[in-house]
Amino acid sequence: MSDVYASISAVHGYVPDDVLTNHDLEQMVDTSDEWIVSRTGIKERRILKGEGKATTDMGVEVVKGLLEKSGTDPSEIDLVILATVTSDMNFPDGANTICSKCGINNAFAYDISAACSGFVFSLFTGAQFIKTGAYKKVIVLGVDKMSSIVDYTDRSTCIIFGDGGGGVLLEPSEGDLGIRDAVMGGDGSGREYLYQTAGGSLKPASAETVAAREHFVTQIGRPVFKAAVSGMKDSVTTLLERNNLTKDEIDWIVPHQANIRIINTLASMLDFPMDKVVVNIDKYGNTTDGTIPLCLWEFESKFKKGDKIVLTAFGGGFTWGSILLDWAYDSN
Ligand code: UT7
């Protein structure tokens, strides 16, 4: 393999304007602001409203921002990967829709579905195309319209999720900065704890499945919580060990935003200071594939060229993964 690294050369994010607060949810289900904040850290989340508005509409905003910020012409893009569990339709994939709406005509594009780990899986996948020398400009997106699959009568899930996402442009790095290594994993036996029953080939959508509310997300929270902590902790630990790095050499950890208690527990088990852990769950909740790119977008101005950053995620499947990278630019 070559010494070329794929580095992030631009980052952008998008959240819809409409805000759904904990107080709004108190009017919809039997819950309280106090319960939601103390159990999850979430104060509000964004909801994409409007007839005909879907995940790719948010993806288009992200791609336009990436192209503009990086001064890239759409024709230069080689590949677009969209991590999502809420593509506009089961097929065609959303990535191609985004390309056609952004004038990206020389690329191939596809979606990756790996629940909340989809963005890190996609980022590592996209990086391989650069590392092999096959491509020079790859866009990786993580975007979800979770409000389209959340049951707003189920208090155990509707308080968690929100809409939004972001993405990055990957290019060959000029020095030796960029994506270094990744530890990815999965355990399909976890599928019984986080799933969408109907609408797939196992149980195609029907009047009965809709009446039974089976096309919404179901989550058994506690086992997912435990597995999330261990999946992220173990993959980060392996990543540091095999790269001969101590925790003190890491400048930032960017974790998937599922629950502030998961993030606090992870930081404590890694003995890593919370002021170097990126958190924005209070504002956006869990946007599934959107959380990590939204964090990169919001904290971009704090990252310095050469900072060592670890991204870590856990999601349904179960799936998990951590990526080690050297940030490649000073944003200002
Ligand atoms: O992003 C993909 C991966 N997902 C995750 O990582 C999520 C992991 N899980 C979690 O974050 C947490 O398990 C939840 C936030 C989903 C739930 O928190 P919890 O502390 O595990 O609560 P619980 O499910 O054990 O429920 C505790 C109690 C129950 O009442 P009883 O049985 O003790 O009387 C629930 O019915 O809290 C009740 N409850 C609520 N009460 C008020 C559940 N949801 C609510 C609510 N408002 N919204």
Image (cartoon, rainbow, N blue to C red):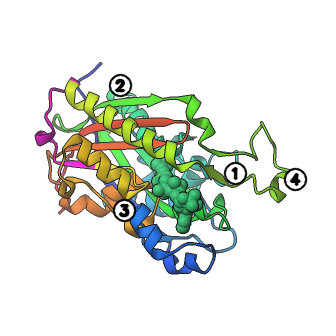
Q: On the image, numbered disc 4 is attached to which residue?
A: 208
Q: Earlier in the sequence, mark 2 or mark 1?
A: 1
Q: CA distance from mark 4 to mark 1?
A: 20 Å
Q: Earlier in the sequence, mark 4 or mark 1?
A: 1
Report the amino acid beneath label 2: Thr
Q: Secondary structure at mark 3?
A: helix
For label 2, count other residues whose C-alpha is less than 10 Å away and answer few (under 14), some (14-19) or many (20+): some
Q: Secondary structure at mark 1?
A: loop
The answer to if 252 sits in the magenta stretch is yes
On screen, 128 above or below 255? above
Look at the image and tell me in which quarter the N terminus lies: top left
Residue extent of the magenta highlight: 242-253
Q: Residue 318 location, x and y as percent?
A: 52, 36
Q: Is residue 174 left or right of residue 263?
A: left
Q: Secondary structure at mark 2?
A: loop
Q: On the image, numbered disc 3 is attached to which residue?
A: 68
For label 1, count other residues whose C-alpha is less than 10 Å away and answer few (under 14), some (14-19) or many (20+): few
Of circles 2 and 1, the one toward us is 1
Q: Earlier in the sequence, mark 3 or mark 1?
A: 3
Q: Residue furthest left?
A: 248
Kindly indicate whether the residue at mark 4 contacts the one at mark 2 (C-beta within 8 angstroms): no
Q: On the image, numbered disc 1 is attached to which residue?
A: 89
* x 77%, y 36%: residue: 202
Q: Residue 256 location, x and y as percent?
A: 39, 50
* x 59%, y 47%: residue: 96
Q: CA distance from mark 2 to mark 1?
A: 32 Å
* x 27%, y 28%: residue: 238
Kindly indicate whether the residue at mark 4 contacts the one at mark 3 (C-beta within 8 angstroms): no
